[in-house]
Structures are given as C-alpha cells and as structure tokens.
Amino acid sequence: MASSSFWDHQEAAQKVIAEANQLKLWTVPYHELKNRFQDVVDLLPEAIELGDSSLVQELMQALSDIDQKLGDLEVRKMLSGELDAKECYLEINAGAGGTESCDWALMLSRMYHRYASKKGWKVEIVDRLDGDVAGIKNITFRFSGPFAFGYCKSEKGVHRLVRISPFDANAKRHTSFASVDVTPIVEDVQVFVREEDLKVDTFRASGAGGQHVNKTDSAVRITHIPTGFVVSCQSERSQIQNRETCMKMLRSKLYEKEVNERQAKLAALGGEKKEIAWGNQIRNYVFQPYTLVKDTRTGEQKGDIQSVMDGEIDEFVVAYLKEFG
C-alpha cells in the first residue's frame, strides 16, 4: 500500500485495502490490549508498595476490562467462516396465530434492534409490513458492522413465546411462533440470475413515508422461482431503487445457499456437526408461569427474560458459536 504505484489499478487496490482492514480488526485491538496489560503489570507492584488503594482498585478494574475485551476477541476468533465477517439482513416473520404472533414478531424486532445498537452496528429497516390489529407481520433489517452475520447466524430458526396474552380477555396462556432468517450481504461477488427465473410484483408501500407513500407502486417483491426465495423492499422512494435492493438481497441468499451446500458436502465427508436446519425451533421464551429463556440447541438458559428482550443475548450467541462455530 505504501508503493507509489498502488493506485494504478484501483479495483485491485480496493481489494487490498479491504483485506488490510479485515486484518486490522485483529491486530489493532490485540496490540491495544497487550500494551494496556503491560501498563498494569508495570504499575501494580508500585501501587501496592506505596499502599495507594485507589490506584490499586483502578488498575484491577482495568485488568477486568482487559479480560472482558480479550474474551470478546476470543469469541470473534470463532467467527472464521467464509461469510462470518459480512454484514447481514435479518428478517422476522410472524407465524400462525394472528395478532398474538404479530405482537411477538414486533417484540423480537425490538430485541434485535437493541442488540445491534449495543454492538455499534448501523441499523436500517429495508422492509416492514404491519399487522392488521397490532404488531408486525414481517420486517427486514440491514445490520452494517464487522462480523454482523457471524454473530447473528445463531438466531436463524423458529422462536417460541409462551405468555398470558394481553389480547385475551380471559387472561389465558398463549403460545406464539415467529421465524428469523439471517442472510450475509455479499456485494463483492458475482452471482448470475436469469430474468426468466424471476417473478416481479410491484405494490404500494405501507406505513409512514409522507406524501409519496400509497400514491405510486414503488414497493417491489421478487420471487426466485427455482429456489422459492422471496425478497421485498419498500424503503427507497423509487421502484428502480427498491428493485436494486431486492436483487442485492436475492444474490446474497443465493450465494449463501451455494456456500452452505459446499460446506455441507465437506462436513459429510469429514463427519463434522451439521448446521442447525432452518425451520427448527431453536429457542423458547417463557413469561408465565415462570420466566425463562432456553436455547434448545445448546441448553443455554437465562431467567432474566426482560434483559434478553432488551437485547442482552450474547450468552446465547457465544454458546452457539462454541458448539457449532
């Protein structure tokens, strides 16, 4: 990169810069932690000898912080898959159950929005369809940040809620389901899609959006006939922009499918653990008669359900990565 001829070939230079930035995600925090740890090692004996309890406490707190950040790096080391470093789309769909399931989908959308915000990712709503009475029928987020797909891939599957429904006058317990799909964003690869394999529908956008909404058929839904993949977007003002976003989402889904099929073949040859299949129930959220969130794949559980719904799901993500990578 220091070469005077580095920018002679801009496309190649961009790839080198992208690779360098990926490496810096490891080297920069590592050297920062190493230097901070050395500072503590050098200062702590002196602070103890001087009897400076406040400085000792401050240094011990710094050591605890270093240990936590080192743990974060160790988790990231598990994210070594081909797609793990990518940004991602996260899509939530309400299951059967009407208003109750739509409300559950809305609760999950809030949970993931908060989780992404805690990670420092940029959050964008690509598509959203509100429920008839309350909640949402489906929503698609774009999470932009390092290793967004690697962290979120553990959430792909069916999420089950058990609670006393606020929509039931008899205060009976209800069980609701919502599915979560996570797709890596792969804008740096070429995926060929034939026009004859696409079914394109246009419709009027719903929800907030000012005068433009509901006046033109700007929202776009594309179905890929061979695979059955369906993508939709209504976040942009024009039909052309929404179609372009849909095609990016579709290409990402097709590329992920190709990678997963390749990895499945390798796993079958090597006898490795297989990835949890889409559609299986992966986690239960129980609000009544007790409070418990339990992951059916790893056995990880947490009684503080409110913190989970506020986006504190790192324990479940880490447990998944430790077991399935």
Image: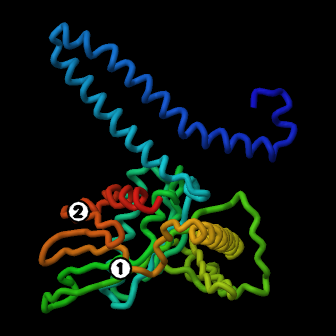
Say which residue appears at 48% left-offset and 32% top-offset.
Answer: 30
The reply to whether residue 98 is in sight is yes
Q: Relative to 24, say whether 124 is above or below.
A: below
Q: Secondary structure at mark 2?
A: strand
**Residue under circle 2?**
302
x, y (%) of residue 320?
40, 61
In front: 316, or 297? 297
Say which residue appears at 20% left-offset and 80% top-offset.
Answer: 163
Count the marks.
2
Type of amino acid under label 2: Lys
Q: Relative to 48, say whether 290 is above or below.
A: below
x, y (%) of residue 312?
31, 57
The reply to whether residue 238 is in sight is no
Quadrant assignment for the N terminus: top right
**Residue under circle 1?**
135
In front: 226, or 246? 226
